[in-house]
Amino acid sequence: MTAVRCIELCKTYYQGDQAIKALDHVNLEIREGGFVCLSAPSGGGKTTLLNAIGGLDRPDSGEIWVAEKRIDNLSKGDLAKLRLHQIGFVFQAFNLIPVLTARENVEFVMQIQGVPADKRAEQAKAILEEVGLEGLDDRRPADMSGGQQQRVAVARAIVSRPALVLADEPTANLDSRNADELMELFVELNQHHNTTFVIATHDQRVMAYAKRLIRMLDGRIVDDIDQQAA
């Protein structure tokens, strides 16, 4: 099954009179269970492509399909439902709610989804254990290390078992040890749950973990490398 398909995506931004092609006729297909890294220099288009796949930004033209459903023409409300139920997001800034505990941060998405309180608590506890945070349920973000906060963010992203996880520079605020531990966690989740990962990064350590490395430049895909075959 195809997890993501992009057909002739174009997106142009304007700085004054200057047109910047963030996506320039991008075509991409990612199979279910893929583990893909998007790499590009600053302004190369990787974050724009990631945001388009996640329904956070609309292309000017072209089509985006997620889990065999076209999403570029959905209403804002339908896009919000798609993100809520089918896509998990991991950002470099963690984006945890500071007044909530680790467990409450993980439960937050499920609460919006309407999951009953007892089931939320059970699933949050299980997923925190899975990401290596057993016993830290009641800690708030300020009382956790950067690596631990990012693991809470990952737990929140995957607790509802989305088919697709999008990560934008997830290791940017982590030291090398925590970055490696996070990527090993991603690999484990990919292998055990067949979760599709698409990661935008400029970090060479992150790229080394990818099954597939896609390099972009000036809004175009310039390399598509199967690293398992390399």
Image (tube, grey):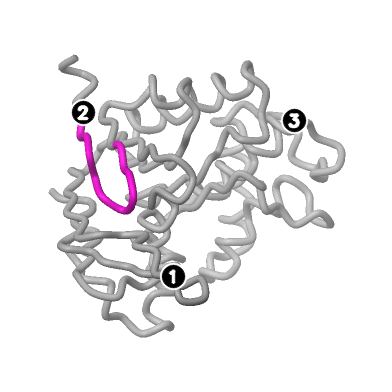
Q: Residues within 10 Å of mark 3 (few under 14, many from 20)?
A: few
Q: Picture coordinates of residue 188 (x, y %)?
A: 41, 25
Read off the residue under disc 2.
225
Task: Tell which circle, 2 or 3, labels the residue nearer the N-terminal end.
Answer: 3
Image location (x, y in percent) of residue 192: 34, 29
Relative horizontal placement of residue 199, taking residue 1 as reference (left or right): right
Q: Secondary structure at mark 2?
A: strand
Badge 1 amino acid: Gln
| Alpha-carbon span between mark 3 and mark 1 | 53 Å
Q: Are circles 2 and 3 on residues that touch, CB within 8 Å?
A: no
Q: Secondary structure at mark 3?
A: loop
Q: Position of residue 106 (x, y in %)?
A: 63, 51
Task: Label the magenta part by its dominant secondary structure.
Answer: strand
The residue labelled by disc 1 is 18
Binning the other alpha carbons within 10 Å of mark 2 as few (below 14), some (14 to 19) or many (20 upward) gives: some
Say above or below: 27 vs 167.
below
User: At x 52% / y 76%, what residue is drawn?
Assistant: 16
Report how far apart the C-alphas of labels 2 and 3 lie in the structure: 40 Å
- Three-letter amino acid code at the position of disc 3: Gly
Is residue 219 on the magenta stretch?
yes
Q: Which range of residues does the magenta coloring cover?
A: 215-225
Residue 130, relative to residue 75: is it above or below?
above
Ranked by sequence position, the earlier of labels 2 and 1 is: 1
Q: Which residue is mark 3?
A: 135
